[in-house]
Image (cartoon, helix red, strand yellow):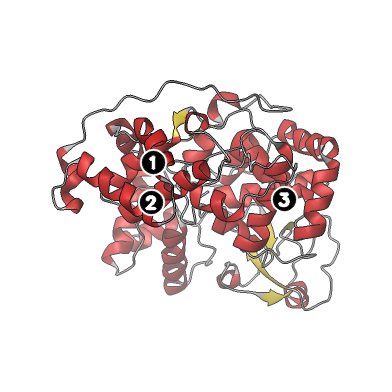
Amino acid sequence: MLQTRFAIAAVALLACSATASAQFAPPPARPAAPKASAPSPRAASCHNGASFDRFLADVKQQAIAAGVSQRTIADTSPYLVYDQGIVNRDRGQRVFGQLFTEFAGRMAAPYRMQNGQQHIKQYAAAFARAEKEYGVPPAVIAAFWGLESDFGANMGNLPTLKSLVSLAYDCRRSEMFVNETIAALKIIDRGDLHPEEMIGSWAGELGQTQFLPVHYVNYAVDYDGDGRRDLLRSPADVIGSTANYIANGLKWRRGEPWLEEIKVPPNLPWEKTDLTVREPRSTWAQLGVTYPDGRPLPNDNLAASVLLPMGRFGPAFMAYPNFAAYTEWNNSLIYSTTAGYLASRIAGAAPMRKPAAPVAQLPFNELKELQQLLVRAGFNVGKVDGVLGQQSRAAVKAMQVKYGLPADSWPTAELLARMRGGTVQAQPQATIR
């Protein structure tokens, strides 16, 4: 996983195995050393025009300075080749454009919930040990395991070293991927994996929970006692390493919840419904927020945010401080909310309620137009791409406040018309059944 995660790379791995699951992942194939492709002339511009070979020689020297042995450098040289296709995939990567209910319906499907519960039973000892040592509940680990690779069924099929060094030679995140390349060499140098075993996603992520090499080096643990930290084949290592990363890398708070579905009243102060706003549960209860079945929230001081991934007419959640671990794992709100929801389902929560009527969604071109208007109004929405990301949501909320509209961060035809200078009839209040 990336700290600023590629929005689609992990989920794309599951597209071919959306109905498959692995009980125990087979050893990955050991292909021959990958072939190189000619670098794009643009690729070397940030390296003072250096050829790929000159750039690679410098990376190897950096790796040696970081403690990687000469033998590992020699052994991995056939795998450190450039592939323009990897760079093209990175530059052309898609982002999440589905509604949360559509994405969660597919990725947090009952079969994946059941597989998560089954894996918790099958590897009960490792899960119990991880929870005791790191404080991370089994359902949280299992949800990431299921989403990232369908429990090892689909970990990617591209040579990791080739992917990393190709992205390192590209100019957009060169420093980051140089560090990832060196970390991958350290994994080999310390005997965890062999070069030919390092097969993963095009973004360089490895293993059943798709660790980037830097995270592999820093957080992978040998939980089965065989002397290797093997996140490709050892379920115990996967469980322990994922728990270690969530606890120590993402700062999980032991014993606290992460995400719960709630029911919101029609007159909630919508401007408060944002991950940046935390209030005690007692305050949310006073404002009329309840559990879906009408039970009151606990009258305590546990801080939480109200999360509306599809605005006030869609599903509603109480997001606790631990939810930050999900947005750090993957900064797509749709992915992170789906991961938290799947974890709650694996832990025994009921399915989320469905809107009584479809939630109105701006078409792609209109959302892109709205983003352009927001940019003209002085907002930074990130890339104008017709996709509702965190920056676009924040800008939408600010303009909703300005126009006196319900500030739920959900872009509507009414807001678009206001920003165009016209008017449109507000959509009717929908309810959750």
Residue sitting nearer the eye, 427 or 64: 64
Task: Say left or right for 6 vs 237.
Answer: left
Which one is in front in this view, the residue at disc 3 or the one at disc 1?
Answer: 1
**Which numbered disc, 2 or 3, marks the residue that appears first in the sequence?**
2
User: x and y percent of residue 20 in the render?
Assistant: 66, 24
User: x and y percent of residue 288 in the render?
Assistant: 75, 70
Q: Verify CB contact (< 8 Å) between mark 3 and mark 1.
A: no
Residue 356 appears anywhere in the view? no
Q: Which mark is residue 195?
A: none
User: x and y percent of residue 216 in the render?
Assistant: 56, 49
Gap in Å between the C-alphas at discs 1 and 2? 8 Å
**Residue 302 in the image: above or below residue 335:** below
Gap in Å between the C-alphas at discs 2 and 3? 35 Å
Q: Residues within 10 Å of mark 2 (few under 14, many from 20)?
A: many
Residue sitting nearer the eye, 299 or 134: 134
Q: Amino acid at mark 1?
A: Ile
* Residue that badge 2 annotates: 63
SS assignment at label 1: helix
* Residue that badge 1 annotates: 73
Q: How many marks?
A: 3
Residue 250's quadrant in the figure? bottom right
Residue 166's quadrant in the figure? top left
Q: Verify CB contact (< 8 Å) between mark 1 and mark 2.
A: yes
Residue sitting at x 50%, y 52%? 214
Residue sitting at x 85%, y 44%? 125
**Which numbered disc, 1 or 2, marks the residue that appears first in the sequence?**
2
Gap in Å between the C-alphas at discs 3 and 1? 37 Å
Q: Amino acid at mark 3?
A: Val
**Residue 110 in the image: above or below residue 212:** above
Q: Which mark is residue 140?
A: 3
